[in-house]
């Protein structure tokens, strides 16, 4: 099979990254978690006290973008690539509820999106890539051969995210996570620059009642169908 570009968009906590990792491993493709890139920039802004619940110094962050170096490094033990910020592994730090609360605010900044989209397009220029995020099929790779749009109810997504955070030892309440999911949905779909929308040629998958295996098998069938058409 010829290598293709697989773009996976959708709401937060719909399992986009899990699916993308599964597909990349099965197909021998490169996997890029664009959400991790935005989370890393957010973490950088938090470290410099440029973003918080009630403030955002966008100018300071934009001026410091040239100082932000992002790269993924494959971890053989985990089976996927981890996020590095200025040569420091920040994979665990960027998954916290604190970063989740602020990432949509940082992702709204046009200069941040421009910088990261350029890096993402460079990563995928040779195809053979699975990339997930909010604007992959609409902005980053509008010509991707296969576009998926993942969705599920807010309560289902909050429960998944809550279980994930508790498993990692973080102290959060379900109500707190649900509020975060709903707030991110609103910001992601209402921002001026690259809002979260389903690409016209994307296949929508509601995975509210699907297991990870059922979802994987469904998408794998779509990939093989694409190659056989």
Image (tube, helix red, strand yellow):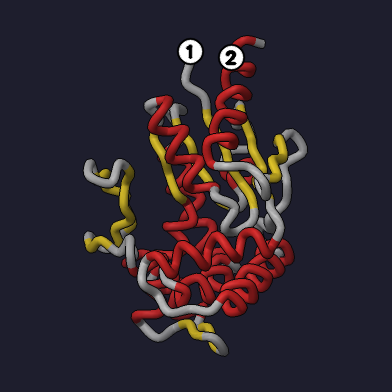
Q: Position of residue 66 (x, y in %)?
A: 36, 64
- Disc 2 residue crowd, few under 14, some 14–19, many 20+, Cα 10 Å: few
Residue at position x 62%, y 10% from top?
228
Residue at position x 48%, y 48% from top?
17
Left/right of residue 153 with respect to residue 104 in the rendered view:
right
Pointer 1: what residue?
Answer: 1
Left/right of residue 198 with respect to residue 96 in the rendered view:
right
Pointer 2: what residue?
Answer: 227
Q: Position of residue 196 (x, y in %)?
A: 68, 55
Quadrant including the C terminus: top right
**Residue 109 or 9: which is nearer the viewer?**
9
Left/right of residue 94 with respect to residue 17 in the rendered view:
left
Badge 1 element: loop
Q: CA distance from mark 2 to mark 1?
A: 7 Å
Q: Residue furthest bottom?
A: 54
Badge 2 element: helix
Up/down of 115 relative to 93, above or below: above
Residue at position x 23%, y 63% from top?
88
Up/down of 47 relative to 24, above or below: below
- Disc 1 residue crowd, few under 14, some 14–19, many 20+, Cα 10 Å: few
**Residue 169 or 181: which is nearer the viewer?**
169
Residue at position x 71%, y 64% from top?
192
**Residue 162 or 15: which is nearer the viewer?**
162
Q: Closer to the N terminus: mark 2 or mark 1?
A: 1
**Residue 170 or 1: which is nearer the viewer?**
170
Q: Position of residue 212 (x, y in %)?
A: 53, 41
Q: Residue furthest top?
A: 228
The image quadrant of residue 177 is bottom right
Residue contact between numbered discs 2 and 1, judged by CB atoms under 8 Å = yes
Q: Position of residue 108 (x, y in %)?
A: 60, 68
Up/down of 107 relative to 63, above or below: above
């Amino acid at each position: 099979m010829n290598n293709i570009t697989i773009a996976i968009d959708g709401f937060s906590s719909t399992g986009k990254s899990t699916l993308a990792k599964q597909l990349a491993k099965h197909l021998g493709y490169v996997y890029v978690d664009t959400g991790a890139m935005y989370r890393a920039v957010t973490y950088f802004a938090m470290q410099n006290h440029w973003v918080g619940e009630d403030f955002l110094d966008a100018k300071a962050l934009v001026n410091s973008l040239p100082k932000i170096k992002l790269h993924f490094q494959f971890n053989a033990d985990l089976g996927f690539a981890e996020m590095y910020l200025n040569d420091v592994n920040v994979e665990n730090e960027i998954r916290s509820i604190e970063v989740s609360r602020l990432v949509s605010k940082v992702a709204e900044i046009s200069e941040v999106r421009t910088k990261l989209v350029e890096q993402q397009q460079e990563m995928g220029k040779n195809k053979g890539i699975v990339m997930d995020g909010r604007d992959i099929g609409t902005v980053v790779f509008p010509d991707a051969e296969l576009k998926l749009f993942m969705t599920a109810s807010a309560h289902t997504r909050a429960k998944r995210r809550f279980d994930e955070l508790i498993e990692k030892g973080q102290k959060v309440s379900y109500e707190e996570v649900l509020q975060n999911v709903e707030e991110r949905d609103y910001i992601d779909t209402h921002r001026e620059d690259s809002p979260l929308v389903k690409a016209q040629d994307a296949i929508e998958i509601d995975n509210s009642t699907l297991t990870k295996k059922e979802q994987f098998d469904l998408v794998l069938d779509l990939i093989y169908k694409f190659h056989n058409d």
